[in-house]
Image: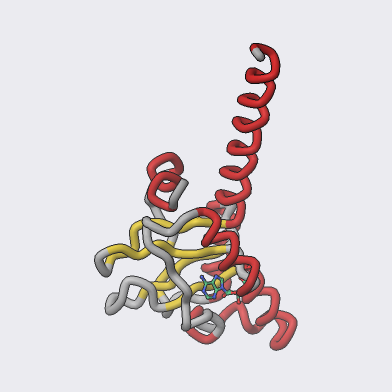
């Protein structure tokens, strides 16, 4: 199973926010869309940054509630690790574990074409394990 196959099931839409918007607008977006991270765009590149709920918690811990009026660009991670549709789920699991983040935007042909979260990876693995278990049960029953 690769990233392209997951995207064809979950969809390719990506929730994004402009780097100039405020942290409170980003928090509202995360809450409304029930997601953990947004891709930050600036009109020049497919991915200018990524802002996750952890960045918001860190900003408030450091600066208090006034951080919420500051622009997203101050708190986003600028060096974003991306993948392509050809990456395998195992490669993504390894990447998320090693780098300690839970979101990977998918870029193909210079375009942002999706995002994979740790939830998508876990869901996929659970389905695979269930299918393997079912196949073994059927094999045993018919052997
Ligand atoms: P997360 O675990 O995804 O909530 O993110 C934890 C931290 O890693 C936050 O500071 C994010 O901005 C950052 N982060 C999340 N995803 C990525 C990524 N694909 N590449 C680089 N940094 C990331």
**Location of residue 47 (image quadrant):** bottom left
In front of the other: 22 or 139: 139
Above/below status of 4 relative to 143? below
The image position of residue 127, as x and y in percent, is 60, 36
Across and down, in percent, residue 94 comes to: 59, 64
Left or right: 84 as drawn, with respect to 117? left
Q: Residue furthest right?
A: 61
Q: Quadrant of ligand 1?
A: bottom right
Q: Position of residue 121 (x, y in %)?
A: 57, 51
Residue that appears at 65% across and 67% down: 97
**Image quarter (top left, top right, bottom left or bottom right) of the C terminus:** top right
Q: How is the image coloured?
A: secondary structure
Query: In the picture shown, does residue 89 fall above or below 8?
Result: below
Instruction: Report the residue that reaches farthest toward the front.
Output: 143
Is residue 139 found left or right of 103 in the rendered image? right
| Residue plotted at (62% across, 76% down) | 55
User: Outermost residue toward the left?
Assistant: 109
State the image coordinates of residue 117 (x, y, percent, origin top left): 55, 57
Quadrant of residue 56 in the image? bottom right
Along the line of sight, the residue nearer the viewer: 111 or 135: 135
In the image, farthest residue toward the top: 142
Q: Across the whole image, how many numbered discs are drawn on residues?
A: 0
Q: Pick whichever, 104 or 78, lies toward us.
A: 104
Residue drawn at x 30%, y 63% as measured from the top left? 108
At 28% from the left edge and 65% from the top edge, which residue is drawn? 111
141 to 12, vertically: above or below = above
């Amino acid at each position: 199973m690769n990233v392209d196959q997951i995207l064809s099931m979950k969809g390719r839409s990506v929730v994004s926010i402009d780097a100039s918007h405020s942290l409170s607008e980003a928090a509202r977006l995360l809450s409304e869309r029930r997601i953990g991270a947004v891709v930050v765009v600036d009109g020049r590149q497919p991915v200018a940054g990524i802002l996750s709920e952890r960045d918001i918690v860190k900003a408030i811990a450091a600066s208090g509630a006034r951080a919420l009026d500051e622009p997203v660009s101050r708190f986003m991670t600028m060096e974003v690790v991306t993948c392509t549709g050809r990456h395998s789920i195992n490669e993504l699991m390894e990447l998320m574990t090693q780098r300690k983040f839970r979101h990977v935007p998918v870029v193909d042909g210079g375009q942002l074409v999706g995002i994979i979260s740790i939830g998508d990876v876990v869901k996929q693995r659970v389905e695979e394990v269930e299918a393997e278990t079912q196949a073994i049960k059927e094999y045993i029953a018919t052997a």
